Image (tube, rainbow, N blue to C red):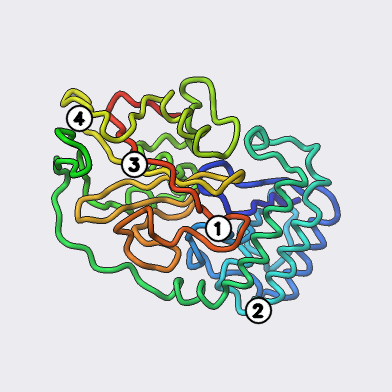
Amino acid sequence: MIRVTADLFSGRPNPSWIMADANGEEILKQIAKEKQIIAKPNAGYDGLGFRGIEIEVISDEKIRGIPNSFKIADGTAEDQKTSIGIASRIVEQMTRYSKLSLDSHRLTPIDKHIQKIILASIEQYQLDLERIGKVIKKRYPKLPKNSKRVTVDDASCCDCKYEESKFNPNFWNADSHVRHNNNCYNYGRNWKTNTFAQPGRFSGQTAGAMSCSEVKAASLRDGLKLRCDCLPQSEYPRRLMALVIAPGVDYHWYRKQDGGFWGHKPGGTPAKNTDNSGNLITDPETCDRGSGSTLNYTDFCDYFYAGKSVSII
């Protein structure tokens, strides 16, 4: 018995399903024969878009030689072609397991629409393999020394101020539980909830669709303010956030950091300060936010302030 998760979203929960029949065991047996398709732990692609298939063995009747949890098709397997082929095969069977309901299915159902998105994202991943390989090898750029937190004048808004914090990825990345259970909204708000926070959930009404208007409205219900709607000193510390959308599919948030760049956290992957090309993010409007037509965060929505009274869950 295995639990499968397609790692591709940033804001909404990733598609996840349980294979409790013989198909799951057959997949494990095939992988056991071709271990070169198993990805290197914590070394794969971690940008926006398809990042691989996670497989977790959830019974103690495991196949010899197979880790309890591992990834395939994340850019680090020795045999990329076979790894991608098995990933596609697993996703093609996905909808038959929709009757076994999980909590995440309320926001990300296991249906043909989601299946189509995953398969199209895998196809785009294949086209981008050369670029992805270069990004994986590219190291984080050196950062300037900075303070814990500074108050800055917003150059785009008369009289508005907000706070920038030192980039601190280890807070989000060192503990695997924290890394997996906090997403881009958590990072943007700078609040670890371990709930994979969703815009509007605190107010009782999440976004009805993955669009700028819907996600923006849900975020405002949580207490965020549009940029230039100045927050008073009583809301200290105030964050500057930016929202982008993959139309009809997903959303993603960035947060301004001290040092002239932006940080973000794509879904349950590590927090980082680089875009899909491995470049330092100095402008969320122009940075590389994906490729292809399915899971590409093409729509830049707006900038927001988040004061201390903003609550997320």
Q: Residue 164's x, y, as percent? A: 21, 44
3D distance between C-alphas at marks 2 and 3: 39 Å
Q: Residues within 10 Å of mark 4 (few under 14, many from 20)?
A: some
Taking the spot 34% from the left edge, 58% from the top edge, the residue there is: 273
Question: What label sits on residue 49 in the rendered view?
Answer: 1
**In the displayed structure image, the side of residue 78 where residue 309 appears, left or right:** left
Whether tag 2 and tag 3 are in contact, CB under 8 A, the answer is no
- What amino acid is at disc 1? Gly
Whether tag 1 and tag 3 are in contact, CB under 8 A, the answer is no
Q: Earlier in the sequence, mark 2 or mark 1?
A: 1
Q: Residues within 10 Å of mark 1 (few under 14, many from 20)?
A: many
Question: What label sits on residue 22 in the rendered view?
Answer: none
Q: Nearer the viewer, mark 4 or mark 2?
A: 4
- What amino acid is at disc 3? Met
Question: Depth check: 66 or 294 in front?
Answer: 294
Q: Residue 46's x, y, as percent? A: 48, 61
Residue assigned mark 4? 236
Question: Depth check: 292 or 73 in front?
Answer: 292
Taking the spot 49% from the left edge, 48% from the top edge, the residue there is: 299
3D distance between C-alphas at marks 4 and 2: 51 Å
Which structural element holds mark 3? strand
Q: Residue 15's x, y, as percent? A: 65, 46
Vertical position of residue 223 compared to residue 193: above or below: above
Taking the spot 19% from the left edge, 41% from the top edge, the residue there is: 154
**In the displayed structure image, the side of residue 248 where residue 88 appears, left or right:** right
- What amino acid is at disc 2? Asp
Q: Residue 101's x, y, as percent? A: 73, 35
Q: Earlier in the sequence, mark 4 or mark 1?
A: 1
Residue assigned mark 3? 241
Which structural element holds mark 2? loop
Which structural element holds mark 1? loop
**In the displayed structure image, the side of residue 173 where residue 132 appears, left or right:** right
